Image: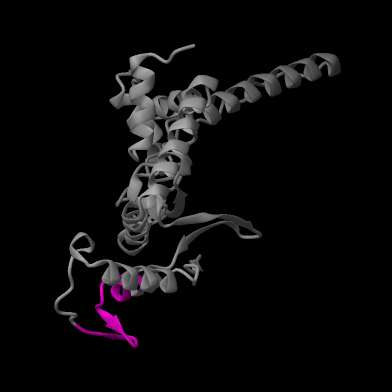
Amino acid sequence: MALSARHLRFVEGILAGKSQADAYRAAGFKARTQRAAESRASELVRKAEVAQELSTRRAAAVAAAMEREQVTADRIIAEVAKIAFGDARSLSEYRRVNCRHCWGKDHNYQRTDGEFRGAQEQHVEHEADRKAHAAICGEKFEPKPFKVLGGPGFDCTRAPNPDCPECKGEGEGKVRVADTRQLPPDAVGIFAGVKRTKDGLEVKTYSKEWALDFLGKYKGLVKGGDLHVHLGEKPVAEMTPEERARRKAELQALLKSKPPEKP
């Protein structure tokens, strides 16, 4: 089945480096929230027709690039530049967020809406059991009030309350790891994978130092580990065949070492 115009624009957005959610919206699809856009885009990209179109276009792009030596070299440099200049904060970040007492009524422990409803239901069930037990034993039943504590409405992303007597306005530290399906283009290049350890998830990135050294050597700015200005460097398009061959050999020598990963 042929893809619609919106589906084709979605595919083109993905191939252009947009995140799935951004490509979804740019194609003309509607979503009320960012989470809804991410969810629907993830479903769309798995559709057989869309997946096939993506695969076909990617294969064609790789084949075309392999036929053009300069495009391949440019792509390599562009990918290394993503490592050198990418922002690792797009992958993970450390936040200070409110504690459970920050915004609760009278600074008592605050539950989420779901936790609050669950606690109410448990209280009703517990009181029913107590009442039945009292009837069986011939005892007087005295109902116990539900403990509201700090009430419902806890939002784990809300900022700390500077007047909180429990955390003194410091809140709690939380580590957030990004959904790698939705990474911006500049973060995709530095992402080297995720490793699950006994202490949790470990986000790995390629070494910025290696990438900067690579680019410095390729552009002639670094020799023997020292930075220097290389005068007379010409664009590849203006080089003679001999100069292009020399630069290609230098690039291949630089590529012999795989960029090291950093946790």
Outermost residue toward the left in this view: 232
Verify whether residue 175 appears in magenta: no
In this picture the colour scheme is one colour
54 sits to left or right of 126: left
199 sits to left or right of 252: right
Residue 252 in the image: state x and y as whole percent.
42, 69
Outermost residue toward the top in this view: 1
> Considering depth in this image, is 248 or 5 the residue closer to the camera?
248
> Considering depth in this image, is 234 or 116 the residue closer to the camera?
234
Residue 228 in the image: state x and y as whole percent.
21, 84
What residue appears at the point 34 percent right and 88 percent down from the top-left corner? 224
> Considering depth in this image, is 141 or 177 the residue closer to the camera?
177
124 sits to left or right of 78: right
What residue appears at the point 45 percent right and 23 percent down from the top-left corner? 40
- Corner quadrant of residue 83: bottom left
Outermost residue toward the front in this view: 241
Span colored in magenta: 214-228
> Considering depth in this image, is 211 or 257 the residue closer to the camera?
257
Residue 196 in the image: state x and y as whole percent.
62, 55
- Corner quadrant of residue 147: top right
What residue appears at the point 32 percent right and 60 percent down from the top-left corner? 81
